[in-house]
Amino acid sequence: MIEKIDLCTKALSLRKDLGEDTTSPIDVFSLAHTIPKLTLVFYPMGDHLSGICIKNDGNPVIAINSAMSIGRQRFSLAHEFFHLYFDEQEQSNACTIKIGCGNEVEKAADQFASYFLIPPVALFEAIKKIQGSEIDNFRIQAIVRLEQYFGVSRQAMLYRLIQDKQITSQEANRFRLGVIRSAVNLGYDDALYKPLSENKQYKTYGYYIQQTEALLEKDLISTGKYEQLLLTAFRPDLVYGEEFEGGELND
């Protein structure tokens, strides 16, 4: 098993390499778009898989289970970053739903993802600000504020607090039920705890789309082939203009 300190170093180093600091919450989806030649696919994968990373000879593909909550998808993407950048295995990796399970590589990827999304210093400062003098007595209000601040699922937040010995597994169990209600009752939107809308659960972004556009511009493929490639990638919006009707919005 890779040591936690090494995984933390790797996570913070990758944040820097991708242009982020080592303390702030991040938009991991936006970061994915800055990775050269990465194709990002959202696809409902059922109840057992959270994501897949295929290295593909320098043209990597990361697929995320879009049937999971947004918070869990963010964690899954960070998990797949570990496989992409630090896993020495050449083959693809299919990752399970439950955090902290699987073989040693999967456990390391989960720990990496936690550090990537929730840097230690940032977590310490957030806990101190939220809890004040009651550091050792976590309540649901603190759990919700932490997961909202870092943009992660309840499962991911509890996993990290257990790993850092802030709470025990037994104490965490009382926070596992009524997740959405606990957030809504505190005035938060419930989007973090729900999956993508149905029209976005099948989508491909990134390098595949860029290359398809480039092939058409260079007359290397016909319009028919272009449309076929986009439809295969779940992008009828780019073929039929479904999401562009009504013109541009004022920003």
Image (tube, grey):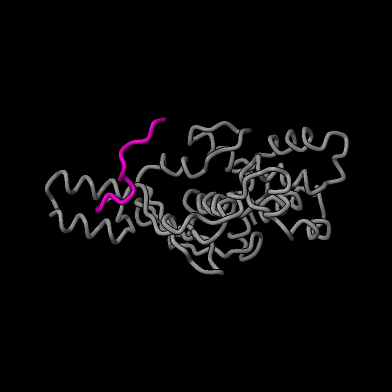
Q: In which quarter of the image is the N terminus?
A: bottom right
Q: Can residue 95 be seen in this view?
A: yes
Q: Main secondary structure of the magenta part?
A: loop
Residue 69 appears left or right of 170: left
Residue under the point 59% across and 60% down: 106
Residue 155 pos. (x, y %): 67, 56
**Magenta run includes residue 249:** yes
Residue 28 appears left or right of 183: left
Image vertical order of residue 65 relative to residue 208, above or below: below
Q: Quadrant of the C terminus?
A: top left
In magenta, the rendered stretch is 239-251
Residue 145 pos. (x, y %): 71, 42
Foreground residue among 59 and 186: 186
Residue 218 pos. (x, y %): 14, 44
Foreground residue among 108 and 154: 154
Residue 115 pos. (x, y %): 63, 44
Residue 114 appears left or right of 220: right
Residue under the point 17% across and 48% down: 216
Q: Can residue 53 be seen in this view?
A: no
**Magenta run includes residue 224:** no
